Image (cartoon, rainbow, N blue to C red):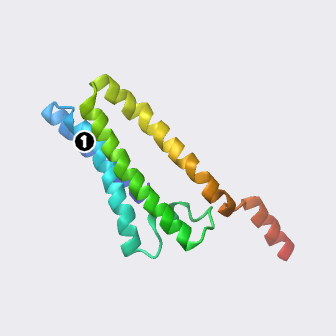
Amino acid sequence: MDKFQWITFVGVLFACTLTIVFQSVTFLKWKAPVVNWIFAAAFIASRKFSDKPAIEHMMGHTVNAPKEIWNRLNNVWVIYFILLGAINLMVAYSFGEATWLQFKVFGNLIITFLFIIGQMPLLAKYIEDPEENKEAERDSA
């Protein structure tokens, strides 16, 4: 697992353990916002402590975009994580548990899917085709 998967795993394990120990759904309601905000902080920190923004670490092997695009995209992901955390918290405390659970399962997935699809026009021209790379290597040999 990569770092982000480990962070998510530890957060889920922590929230689930607290939920079971204290018999309260409150910890689960806070898990999604906190994990999203941790990701936002990690994406911000990646700009300070790494030569590449976090999104470039994740997608740079298939997308050959200029540094300016990676930085802008990283900032957009930070905003996304902050807003998604806030939306999760709003739904958790403004609606009943059934609605919150439906949003947690389906709403987050749909929002994330649409967010990623929205980035495709920006990234499409920078996506590298592995087949073209293989052909170019054969032609140069």
Q: Position of residue 22 (x, y in %)?
A: 13, 34
Q: Position of residue 29 (x, y in %)?
A: 26, 37
Q: Is residue 53 toward the left or the right of residue 16 in the image?
A: right
Q: Position of residue 104 (x, y in %)?
A: 37, 34
Residue at point 62%, 61% (across, down): 62
Residue at point 45%, 58% (across, down): 76
Q: Is residue 29 toward the left or the right of residue 2 in the image?
A: left
Which SS class for mark 1? helix
Residue 90: quadrant of the picture: top left
Residue at point 40%, 71% (across, down): 47
Q: Is residue 106 above or below residue 127?
A: above
Residue at point 17%, 31% (across, down): 24
Q: Position of residue 106 (x, y in %)?
A: 44, 32
Q: Quadrant of the C terminus?
A: bottom right
Q: Is residue 96 above or below residue 36?
A: above
Q: Nearer the viewer, residue 132 or 118?
A: 118
Q: Is residue 28 above or below residue 80?
A: above
Residue 92: quadrant of the picture: top left
Q: Which residue is mark 1?
A: 30
Residue 61 in sight: yes
Q: Is residue 137 toward the left or the right of residue 112 in the image?
A: right
User: How many numbered marks does the figure carry?
Assistant: 1
Q: Nearer the viewer, residue 68 or 108?
A: 68
Residue type at tag 1: Trp
Q: Quadrant of the N terminus?
A: bottom left
Q: Residue lying at the far right in this picture: please name it.
A: 139
Residue 141 in sight: no
Few, some or many C-alpha atoms within 10 Å of disc 1 (few <14, some 14-19, many ≥20)?
Answer: some
